[in-house]
Structure formats: structure tokens, C-alpha cells
Image: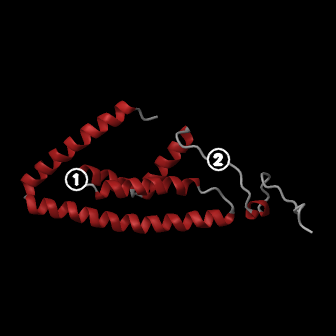
Amino acid sequence: MFSFRFLFLLFILVPFVEIYLLIEIGSVIGAPWTIFCVVLTAVIGAWLVRIQGLATLTRLRRNLDEGALPAMELVEGVFLLVAGVLLLTPGFFTDAVGFACLTPPLRRAVARHLIARGVIRAAGGTTHPAGARRGRRDAIEGEFRRVDDR
């Protein structure tokens, strides 16, 4: 699991890497083009996050309607949130990591890895009728009536 030392190091190193890359790239292509590239990656990234977020939300709703646990979709949603934050943060390093989070095969592979390692835990079971129709054994069917009804 992440430790505070790792997070502290991350908050110290990432800004230095960003500043270094901005200075180096700015010295090669010029300040106006550097600013243009940073803004362009933010706009493209926000557009891609929106499209992939809506697709993930559609898959999540479909799984819920079928009575399946949408664990992968929830983890992908977190990755998309992180990608959005990274892409809106000015800089080339955070944009590269953000675009990596937007790559569906990579995102799903990392999500599967995190779920398999137990970093992310999913609760099992369903109470949705669709789960009972598919022969799931964790759904209990029955009838009830309220005692105070007349």
C-alpha cells in the first residue's frame, strides 16, 4: 500500500520533473508553442475522459441491470478520474501519465492486477432478481407480508 513517504516523494519529484520538462521543451519550441501544447493536451484529454467516462458508465449500468457486480467499471471510473485530474494539470509528465490512464487495455490490465493483488477488494453477492434468474446461489427468493397490514 502507499506510504506517506512515497506520497511525499511524489509531491516533491513530480513538480520538479514538470518544471524541467517545461523549460527544456520551451527552449526547443518556444514559450508560446509550449503553452499551446499544454492547453491542447488538456482540451483533448478532457474530451477523451468524457467519451470514455460515458462508455464506462453505460457498461456499469448494464452490469447492474444484469445483477453483476461492476467491479471493473468502478475501478476504471477511478482511473478515468485520475486521468482527468492529471490531464488538466499543466505539464507534459502528468499529461503522459494521464493519457496512459486513458488507454483501455493498459487501464484494464492495471485494474485486474490491483484487484488480483487485493489492493482493491470487491464484495460479492447480489440481491438483484436478475442474479437469481441466472442461477446464482447467493440470492434468496421468498415472500413476505407486513404484520401490521390488515
Query: Which element carries disc 2, helix, strand or loop?
Result: loop
Pinpoint residue 39: horizontal percent, then vertical percent. 21, 63
- The single residue placed furthest to the right in the displayed view is 150
Crowd tier of the residue under label 2, counting other residues whose Cα lies within 10 Å: few below 14, some 14–19, many 20 or above? few
Q: Mark 1 points at which residue?
A: 91
Q: Earlier in the sequence, mark 2 or mark 1?
A: 1
Residue 45: image quadrant is: bottom left
Query: Based on the displayed image, in which of its 4 quarters is residue 28 positioned?
Result: bottom left
**Left or right placement of residue 54 versus residue 83 in this view:** right
Residue 68 image point, x, y percent: 66, 58
Does 37 sit above or below residue 101?
A: below
- Give the SS element for disc 1: loop
The C terminus is located in which quarter? bottom right
Amino acid on which disc 1 is placed: Gly
Under mark 2, the amino acid is Ala
| Residue 134, image x, y percentages | 76, 61
Q: Which of 40 and 150 is in front in this view?
A: 150
- Which residue shows up at 76% across the image and 63% down it? 129
State the residue at coordinates (36%, 53%).
Answer: 100
**Marks 2 and 1 close (CB-CB < 8 Å):** no
Left or right position of 123 against 27: right
For disc 1, the neighbor class at 10 Å (few under 14, some 14 to 19, many from 20) is many
Disc 2 to disc 1, C-alpha distance: 38 Å
Q: Which residue is disc 2 drawn over? A: 123
